[in-house]
Image (cartoon, rainbow, N blue to C red):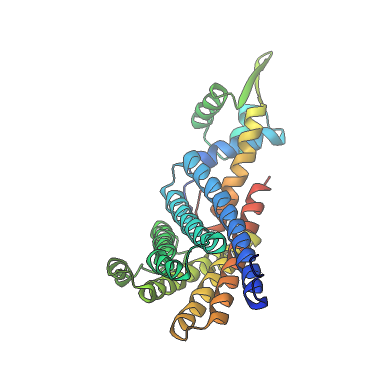
């Protein structure tokens, strides 16, 4: 049985996808393995918290990682490594 | 003019100074690990992090008490009889802290086992109830605490090994090494107390400090994670 990801992991997966260059909703939802509605909800949450910035280019909406978002990813890497050391699943 | 201390006493003083310094390094390692575990708990709200954080915080408190005792013995001009009584009245405190800390860490591993039992990925080891009862029997019995610590460390080590067998990464081997050294240290402490052997006591202390260095390596590894 596949385990459910925590919210923290999902947010990190979205930010990692954006950091890799996936910038529109379709690319992000595929990379982060999320349905459209949930992906949009999390993207709005991340933009509201200042981890992502929303850029409108004509009819297309793109997302870019902010400095705060990059710091969150660095912090998540530390959390992930300490969790791994003690066998805690995120 | 005061006489210089005899050579044997001087070398003993150097040893105490070295052990105190290494104790401080150990405390720094534990506090750094506590900081990362606390941050992980705040960010994720996963209770298991809180168990590990509290466990390492109590372990650090025990180390501070131990360092304080060593420093007191090092700098004090008090009569040796007073130091003897002081050491025997406060002596079990670090042991008690260690037992409590190990109980918290063992609880963390036990809860993680329960959490991931559905996946069957972690070796299922129930926390022995006898250990919880043994915790309550403490009445200044240093030896009993050592037995409790050995049992808890054996439990923790088995869990750490099972975690490592699943992931086989460098990060998971460090807790295995640290807890194995802690266990060895406590195993050396038992004959050291029974045989009143200073050599075994010092060996136990050195092995324990090596365990703390393994945790320092882990803390550095976590700090460098990208």
Q: Where is residue B104 shown, x and y percent of the image?
A: 40, 58
Farthest-out residue, right: A21
B167 left or right of B144?
right
Q: Where is residue B82 shown, x and y percent of the image?
A: 42, 66
B95 left or right of B32?
left
Farthest-out residue, front: B1
Q: Residue at x 57, y 40 (%)?
A: A33
Q: Residue at x 54, y 80 (%)?
A: B198
Foreground residue among B34 and B15: B15
Residue B123 is drawn in which quadrant? Answer: bottom left
Could one spot residue A27 in this view of the protein?
Answer: no
- Please tell me whether residue B53 is drawn above or below residue B172 in the rendered image: above
Q: Residue at x 47, y 65 (%)?
A: B122
- Please tell me whether residue A16 is drawn above or below residue B6 in the rendered image: above
Q: Residue at x 60, y 51 (%)?
A: A81
- Please tell me whether residue A61 is drawn above or below residue B207 in the rendered image: above
B34 left or right of B102?
right
- Please tell me whether residue B78 is drawn above or below residue B7 in the rendered image: above
Farthest-out residue, bottom: B195
Residue A13 is drawn in which quadrant? Answer: top right
Could one spot residue B204 in this view of the protein?
Answer: yes
Q: Where is residue A21 shown, x and y percent of the image?
A: 72, 33
Q: Where is residue B24 shown, x and y percent of the image?
A: 59, 56
């Amino acid at each position: 049985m596949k385990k459910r990801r925590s919210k923290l992991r999902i947010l990190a997966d979205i930010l990692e996808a954006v950091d890799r260059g996936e910038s529109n909703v379709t690319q992000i939802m595929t990379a982060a393995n999320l349905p459209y509605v949930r992906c949009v909800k999390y993207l709005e949450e991340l933009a509201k918290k200042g981890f992502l910035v929303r850029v409108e280019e004509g009819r297309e909406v793109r997302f870019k990682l902010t400095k705060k978002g990059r710091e969150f990813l660095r912090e998540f890497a530390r959390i992930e490594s300490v969790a791994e050391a003690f066998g805690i699943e995120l | 003019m005061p006489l210089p201390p005899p050579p044997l006493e001087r070398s003993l003083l150097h040893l105490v100074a070295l052990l105190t310094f290494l104790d401080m390094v150990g405390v720094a390692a534990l506090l750094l690990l506590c900081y990362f575990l606390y941050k992980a708990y705040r960010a994720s709200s996963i209770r298991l992090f809180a168990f590990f954080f509290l466990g390492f915080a109590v372990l650090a408190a025990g180390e501070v008490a131990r360092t304080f005792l060593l420093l007191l013995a090092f700098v004090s001009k008090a009569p040796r009889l007073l130091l003897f009584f002081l050491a025997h009245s406060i002596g079990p405190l670090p042991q008690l802290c260690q037992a409590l800390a190990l109980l918290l860490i063992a609880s963390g591993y036990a809860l993680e086992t329960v959490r991931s039992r559905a996946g069957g990925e972690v070796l299922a080891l129930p926390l022995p109830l006898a250990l919880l009862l043994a915790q309550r029997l403490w009445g200044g019995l240093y030896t009993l605490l050592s037995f409790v610590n050995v049992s808890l460390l054996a439990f923790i080590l088995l869990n750490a090994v099972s975690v490592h067998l699943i992931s086989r990464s460098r990060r998971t081997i460090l807790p295995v090494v640290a807890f194995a050294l802690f266990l060895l240290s406590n195993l050396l402490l038992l004959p050291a107390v029974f045989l009143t052997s200073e050599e075994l006591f010092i060996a136990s202390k050195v092995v324990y400090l090596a365990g703390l260095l393994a945790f320092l390596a882990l803390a550095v590894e976590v700090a460098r994670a990208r």
